[in-house]
Image (cartoon, rainbow, N blue to C red):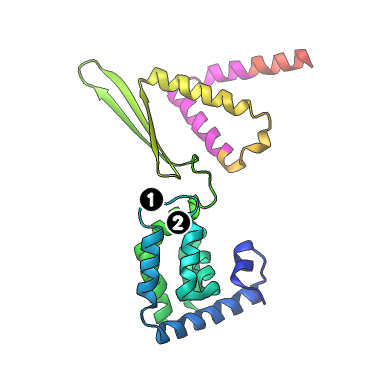
């Protein structure tokens, strides 16, 4: 019989998963009846470990704490619910077929209070503290001089925040340097395909914004001719 760790790893059959979902829902229902303070205990543990700033170690510390009131399997069941934010609502719908109103209420409260915290903690899990988790941008226009100033803030998984600011010309220089750095990796497959598609889409939109489509075609033609000549 599969357990929730198997589910998290993707090692399960449909029949095993449905059986596990039913058994775990019944187990949690019994726990909530025998230990009415379970919900408050879980909320307290989540509040201690993941409310506010989270880091790469927060997820494991949270799971370790949750195992005291919930046990291993129910803790990993909660982890399954939030391991992909895009699927959480669908998972809750599937769970409703097997779970009592008390179980659905329990998970509803947990996700309502700490859903975003759980997702941030999961995203930060096993990331390097120096990796960045989010980016924000502000663009200012001086009405007198009619000059722009751009501020880019980068938040790291460690909770630290750095900012880069300057006129558009300096941001262009920085962006060019970053693109050159990507090429220095030397292995295109080191870049995730989904992120490459996002990069290409942003580049195409920038070229259209600049009105430089014809210039791009000229550059690509020149590079192709250069490649043929060297080949």
The magenta stretch is 196-220
Secondary structure of the residue carrying tag 1 is: loop
Placement of 116 over or under 6, stated as above or below: above
The residue positioned 41% from the left and 82% from the top of the image is 32
Q: Check whether the beta carbons of the residues at disc 1 and disc 2 lie within 8 A of each other.
A: no
Placement of 57 over or under 195, stated as above or below: below
Picture quadrant where residue 184 is located: top right
Residue highlighted by disc 1: 53
Q: For the stretch drawn in magenta, what is the main secondary structure?
A: helix
The residue positioned 53% from the left and 34% from the top of the image is 199
Quadrant including the C terminus: top right
User: Could one spot residue 154 in this view of the protein?
Assistant: yes
Quadrant including the N terminus: bottom right
Q: Is residue 84 magenta?
A: no
Placement of 140 over or under 144, stated as above or below: below
Q: Nearer the viewer, residue 25 or 31?
A: 31
Residue highlighted by disc 2: 119
Q: Position of residue 221 (x, y in %)?
A: 65, 17
Q: Nearer the viewer, residue 75 or 93?
A: 75
């Amino acid at each position: 019989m599969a357990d929730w760790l198997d589910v998290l790893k993707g090692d399960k059959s449909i029949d095993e998963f449905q059986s596990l979902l039913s058994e775990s829902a019944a187990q949690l229902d019994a726990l909530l009846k025998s230990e009415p303070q379970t919900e408050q205990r879980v909320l307290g543990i989540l509040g201690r470990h993941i409310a506010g700033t989270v880091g790469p170690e927060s997820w494991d510390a949270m799971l370790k704490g949750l195992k005291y009131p919930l046990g291993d399997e129910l803790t990993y069941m909660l982890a399954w619910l939030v391991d992909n934010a895009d699927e959480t609502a669908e998972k809750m719908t599937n769970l409703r077929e097997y779970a009592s109103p008390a179980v659905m209420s329990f998970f509803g409260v947990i996700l309502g209070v700490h859903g975003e915290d759980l997702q941030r903690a999961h995203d930060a899990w096993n990331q390097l503290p120096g990796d960045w988790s989010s980016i924000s941008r502000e663009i200012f226009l001086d009405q007198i001089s009619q000059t722009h100033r751009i501020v880019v803030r980068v938040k790291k998984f460690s909770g630290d925040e750095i900012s880069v600011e300057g006129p558009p010309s300096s941001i262009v220089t920085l962006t060019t340097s970053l693109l050159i750095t990507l090429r220095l990796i030397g292995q295109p497959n080191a870049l995730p395909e989904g992120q490459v598609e996002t990069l290409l889409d942003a580049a195409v939109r920038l070229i259209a914004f600049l009105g430089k489509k014809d210039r791009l075609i000229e550059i690509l033609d020149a590079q192709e001719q250069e490649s043929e000549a060297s080949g």
